[in-house]
Amino acid sequence: MDLATEILLYVSSAVIIHILVFYFVMVTKKKGRNIKDKHVVVTGGSSGIGLWIAVTCAKQGAHVTLVARNVQLLEKALKVVEQHRQDASQRLSFKSIDLTKSYDEVAKSLEEVEEQNGPIYMLVNCAGMAICGVFEEITPEDAQFLMDVNYKTAYNCTRYVLPKMKHARDGIIVITGSQASLLGIYGYGPYAAAKFALRGMAETIAMEASHLGVSVTLALPADTDTPGFENEEKTKPEETKIISGSGGLHKPEEVAKKIVSDALNENFFSILGAESWVVTLLCSGMAPWGGFLFTVLQAFALIPLRIISYFVRGQFTSIVRKCAAQKKLRQEVKEKKSN
Ligand SMILES: NC(=O)c1ccc[n+]([C@@H]2O[C@H](COP(=O)([O-])OP(=O)(O)OC[C@H]3O[C@@H](n4cnc5c(N)ncnc54)[C@H](OP(=O)(O)O)[C@@H]3O)[C@@H](O)[C@H]2O)c1
């Protein structure tokens, strides 16, 4: 084959591949959902990621209800959301609810929210927080609190909206997990347990409800610059900071925009950044993530990534050993000084 024929073959196959990819993208592209004039409830909407999700939804013309406990914070947050209203007819409000209370109490409060702003079309479960520490250092009370504030809050709200959405054959549920929903990380024991529980819940309701028009998105934010993150840093062991801090700190407005966009495009996982993509891929199991072509691409990417993960895990283990050796040394110096 001469050079000219080779070039012609190369160019024509490149053109054919591009046409096929373009055709595939156009045919399979889902028309995103629209929340204009729809009622969105954001739990944890008074702060951090939840507040920015509320702002993003208000910008898209939705009626938004912020839910959290502290009324002063809710009032302040509502003023921020108000600045982004698109339309005078938009109903923007808040409701103070402790979502860790019994299901009946939470359901009654959500009924009142619906009486005021209409049926909930999109529920964003964002209330939650982390307390870090080595497993046995976190008190049983704090471990129970973490399960309540992360899992029970989302369970209560989802349990309330899901049958109504199934009946209406329409609706969106967002559940905010974390990278700790995917893998156990040093210092995140009881928090990871609660976030793993949310992943189980999200995968289950996605299977039970997607054929009835209800889409489910599991958001898996990495470290994000919020008041909650600032608080989490206070209890974070050195090992956790080194292991989880390598990915940098995201802006809450970017994370929020991505979560809303993924929810409206009916993507099961919502992730931001290459590192999160790799971790999610490694831990995705049988989760409903992408179509057939994307699954085939994932399968090819998984082979080298699984091998790389062996070495990354080894690096984590060596960080833990190094920190333990340094702690031992510091302890010995302290004891010597006190003798
Ligand atoms: N920031 C990060 O780096 C990061 C990373 C991964 C995952 N996440 C997850 O993302 C979500 C939001 O995190 P964030 O950092 O934005 O948190 P944040 O700034 O601390 O905000 C937490 C929100 O939850 C509300 N809340 C807490 N307990 C509640 C309860 N019992 N009932 C109702 N509302 C309650 C808080 O308001 P009140 O206290 O007034 O109730 C507040 O509005 C959490 O689920 C968190 O685990 C965050």
Image (cartoon, rainbow, N blue to C red):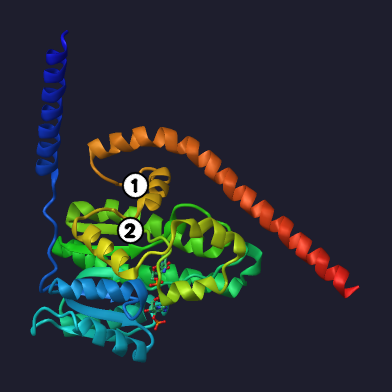
The picture places residue 270, in percent across and down from the top left corner, at 31, 56
For the residue pair 248 and 114, the one nearer the viewer reads as: 248
Q: Position of residue 297 (x, y in %)?
A: 30, 35
**Left or right: 60 in relation to 286:** left
* Mark 1 secondary-structure assignment: loop
Q: Identify the residue shown where x is 58% and y is 62%.
A: 187
> Can you identify the residue that label 1 sits on?
287
Specify the amino acid type for callout 1. Answer: Ala
Residue found farthest to the top: 1
Mark 1 and mark 2 residues within 8 Å of each other at the beta carbon:
yes
- Left or right placement of residue 252 versus residue 266 in this view: right
* The furthest residue to the right: 339
Please report the residue visible at 38 percent of the width from the left and 44 percent of the height from the top: 281
Q: Residue at (56%, 59%) from the top-left corner?
A: 242
* Along the viewing direction, whichever of 169 and 3 lies nearer the viewer: 3
Of residues 235 and 44, which is closer to you in this image?
A: 235
Q: Is residue 61 visible?
A: yes
Extreme-front residue of the structure: 3
Q: Is residue 59 above or below residue 11?
A: below
Residue 283 on image: x %, y %: 42, 46
Whether disc 2's CB lies below 8 Å from ligand 1 is answered no
- Secondary structure state at the residue bearing disc 2: strand
Quarter of the image where the N terminus is located: top left
- The image quadrant that residue 124 belongs to is bottom left
Label 1 Cα crowd, 10 Å radius (few <14 / some 14-19 / many 20+): some
Quarter residue 285 falls in: top left
Residue at point 77% right, 60% down?
Answer: 328
Left or right of 246 in this view: 257: left
Q: Which residue in the structure is indicated by mark 2? A: 218
Q: Is residue 325 left or right of residue 205?
A: right
